[in-house]
Image (cartoon, coloured by chain):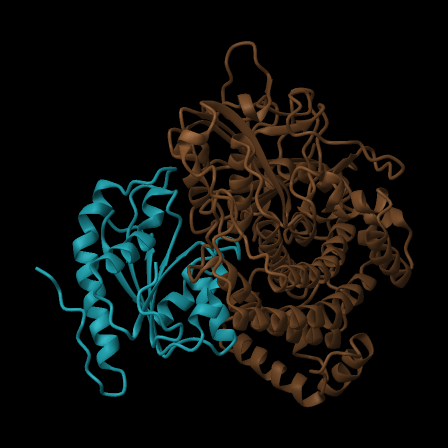
Chain colours: A cyan, B brown
Amino acid sequence: MTVGSVETARVLVLGLGNRLLSDDGVGPVLVDTLAAEGEAAAEVELVDGGTQGLMLLSRIAGRRALLILDAVALGAAPGTVHVLDGPAVLASGGASSTAHEANAGELLRAAALLGDLPARVTVVGIEPAELRTGMDLSEAVTRALPAALQTIRDVLRDMLAAQEGICVSPCQAKS
Amino acid sequence: MSRRVVVDPITRIEGHLRVEAMLNDRGVIENAMSSGTMWRGIEVILQGRDPRDAWAFCERICGVCTTVHALASVRAVENAIGIKVPQNADIIRNIMFLTQMVQDHVIHFYHLHALDWVDVVSALKATPAATADLAQKVSPTWHNSSPGYFADVQGTVKKFVESGQLGIFQNAYWGHPAYKLPPEANLMAVAHYLEALRWQKEIVKIHTIFGGKNPHPNYLVGGMASAINMERLNYVRDLITDAARMVEGMYIPDLLAVASFYPEWTTIGGGLGNYMVYGDLPQNGIGDPSRFRFPGGVILNKNLGEVLPVDLTDQGQIREEIAHSWYEYPAGKEALHPWEGVTAPKYTGPKPPYKQLDENGKYTWLKAPRWKGNAMEVGPLARMLVGYASGRADFKEVVNEALGKLKVPATALFSTLGRTAARGLETRLAVNWLGAEFDHLMTNLKSGDSATADTAHWEPSTWPADCKGFGFTEAPRGSLGHWVQIHGGKIANYQIVVPSTWNASPKDGKGQHGAYEAALMGTPMADPLRPVEILRTIHSFDPCLACASHVIGPDGRKLSEVVVR
């Protein structure tokens, strides 16, 4: 599920969540979609991180920017697309994790402690409707996918443009 | 009148494990309930699928348990179809297994369990020079032990604490009277916690090398699909050497140093006294249990004089009951062997959020697996005891050495600290075996044997029309079994019994408690509002799910609620 073969690609797109728990798996599903569209630049690596928690620390180290795709439950309407920046994610979810089912907050705090936190961290998430056993996304989340993908492309373009003044724009939206 | 302590977790998905502890007037836990509060039912997803794909779904069940579920799954399908994998496939699977075990145990100790014993805030009071003296005494072979190094670590931690971002350190009870380490020992442990986090970034690269670049490794019915490249294998050798150095130079000395401050925990938290191991790490194929590095067997009532054989295919041995679980079985059935297993949910509990569950009714999404009707503990302690009681020299050596250093008798193993120590001792064996398995692979490759898969049975047309099989492994947290029935090339039934189902089991029809429940009973609590004692015992099992514990007082009032990560 990786595109952009260099392990130290400057930008890492990391999908988090469990594919067996319906909307919780939206992060990995978004990674699949990006990979299938083949839009990622060579500087971007796409990784389906599942729920591997701290095992993913090695993937985060050495990046300039990190874009996490995840189910994010903030109590908004199901299907709402959330964009959170690094500090907000670091501060969130203090008591809400285990190393075994780690969430983005836990992973980022551990990375920060090791000095491995990329300079820029953004989370694009979708408010889940259902977290039951099953491999299908809910209708609300399915409807939100195009908007989320557009947001992801915008964030990625911005992340790449900010790299040493080199402007790469492989992430233009498809109509 | 009893008091009740409830522990319920909020994880990325709410509700996993929940523990309720009922206290008596003296502040001692006199009853406990362990509940799985979310239904998973992966078995239902697998029905009707191609058995060759099952491992890829199973791999997603649990984040850290990826490789073990994939392994149990491919073994179950191979067993059903009658495939014997080449020796190199077993060796590569053993390398994957052992890498995960070493990584998982080290991370469990430092990241999840150490903070039950180590006070991070107290570490700020330590003198770096005195910490360096202590470290050089405890771990003479470990390189990072200068006063300057510990001053740097202290500075890092101080910055985190002062910024209000205790971050990953926040889930604990700093300043609790149950913490007994001096500030210098706390600082040393915190420094090593950071080193362990850094080290694990490297060791997991072994999985990448053998399992592919995706963080979810590739398994294959019939063997392994590894592309073997000599240059990368040399790198694996370096990673194994580093791992062994870290386990012997840092983890084990830290474990023994921490344990020496908590002798009372060698008499608390023992629980059932029944231990079960399926066995793993085949040296002559999965069909020859006499050549497993981890011998299988059962110990009942702490009797180390006898190891009973365990048979996963005997329908009278492993059976799951549902007297206290939210499921229904066909009329007249009270216990089912996994081959005949039924996963039909029927929730009859209170509407969440609820205050407490009824221990006399159904109270959990976990079934109650039993071995010949007995509740069993699985995991590192079970494996070390079965190896020890089987008379295996390698097990006896590491166990006796640790007992000698701590100056405690073998009965000290039947405890919370015994469980924690067993995990460390098992890691010593595992890292040593990891090197041996790797050397074996290199010998085979150099002699021209590079076969890693049997593809003769890949096509369903080569399979029996109806067949059934079982696959097993020893996951870091205990015995894991998968049972599959295949009809017409598709999965007709699939049942998984995970280690935490054994350990977090509810009561059965006879009222026998599961391992967590039994282990909590009799535990004295210094401060029911801050139930660190519950964290210590539940963490000693390394639960694969977050667990919330609730403490209920003698008047029925909830005293505290805490997430056991």
Q: Is residue B274 above or below residue B214?
A: above
Q: On the rendered image, what quadrant is the N terminus of chain A found in?
A: bottom left
The spot of residue B397 in percent (x, y) is 86, 57
Q: Residue at x 34, y 56 (%)?
A: A70
Q: Nearer the viewer, residue B411 or B303?
A: B303
Q: In the drawing, does residue B487 fall left or right of residue B278?
A: left
- Displayed quadrant of residue B275: top right
Total marks in image: 0
Q: Is residue B339 above or below residue B473?
A: above
Q: In the drawing, does residue B298 fall left or right of residue B47?
A: right
The spot of residue A109 in percent (x, y) is 47, 69
Q: Nearer the viewer, residue A153 or B353?
A: A153
Q: In the drawing, does residue A100 fall left or right of residue B319?
A: left
Q: Residue at x 88, y 57 (%)?
A: B403
Residue lying farthest top?
B332
Q: Nearer the viewer, residue B389 or B507?
A: B389
